Amino acid sequence: MKLVLDTHTHTIASGHAFSTIIENAREAFRKGLQLICITDHGPEMPGGPHIYYFGNLKVIPEKIEGVEILKGVEANIMDEEGRIDLPEKILRKLDIVIASLHDECFEPSEDVERNTKALINAIKNPYVDIIGHPGNPIYPIDIERVLEAAKEYGKFIEINNSSFVTSRRGSEKICPIIAGKAKEMGVRVAVGSDAHICFDVGRFDEAIRLLEDINMPEELVLNTSVDKVKQYLQEKRKRIGGENI
């Protein structure tokens, strides 16, 4: 399976990442990627960028080093109502919104109902496109219910390569279950490197291995075609009338 874009990358603006947008784009070009999404952490993440950062993403060129750039955020889910840490006036201007649970913003809990409710309510947010790293074992969820909501609302579930490599220990046991159930239910997935340094942009080795092991149909994988992304963004524009998508 050949992936031509990365839906989840961070820059120095996230506060704990180490590369610039230009460095990420250069690495993406070197690896043959056609598109990357800049998805720095939302402002409630300690060390994260101010809300003004997201409001000014419009100054970034559409292409850098020959690679298309989508402007986005990895927003923090703040509560079980699915509230995220950017207001609608900013979300409307972004191309891609990942919503994720992080322990700095949402207390880890074994309460499956609470965690499941938080993800489902985030999915219902019309500006949210992708649920980030849902296999994190510190947030056990009802996988089938989350996937049902993703399918109903036309959202993507992330297969996060970093979860297998550098973070969220234990995800490697849960992510195959999520991916297998997504295949069974026909739920679309997005593969993100979750790069926090440019050298990890386009690093999909573990995620690809998982998708190939379960024979995931390419039509369910967003990253196999830039046209898929653009078609989705057209659908999103019609749905919410965003300014910049």
Image (spheres, helix red, strand yellow):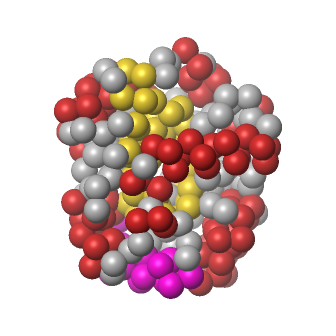
Locate residue 39 relative to residue 244 in the image: left or right: left
State the image coordinates of residue 225 (x, y, percent, origin top left).
Answer: 43, 49
The residue located at (61%, 49%) in the rendering is 232
Residue 15 appears anywhere in the view = no
State the image coordinates of residue 203 (x, y, percent, origin top left).
Answer: 25, 50
Query: On screen, 213 above or below 196?
Result: below
State the image coordinates of residue 214 (x, y, percent, origin top left).
Answer: 33, 81
State the image coordinates of residue 97 (x, y, percent, origin top left).
Answer: 59, 45
Locate residue 143 relative to residue 69 in the image: left or right: right
Query: On screen, 183 above or below 80?
Result: below
The residue located at (56%, 23%) in the rendering is 57
The residue located at (45%, 38%) in the rendering is 37
Magenta part mainly helix, strand or loop? helix
Query: On screen, 19 above or below 99?
Result: above
Residue 219 appears anywhere in the view = yes
User: Residue 225 or 75: which is nearer the viewer?
Assistant: 225
Q: How many marks?
A: 0
Screen quadrant of the C terminus: top right
Please state the extent of the stretch shown in magenta in the rendering: 167-185
Answer whether residue 180 is magenta in the image: yes
User: Residue 210 or 48: which is nearer the viewer?
Assistant: 210
Residue 91 location, quadrant: top right
User: Residue 154 or 77: which is nearer the viewer?
Assistant: 154
The residue located at (45%, 35%) in the rendering is 38
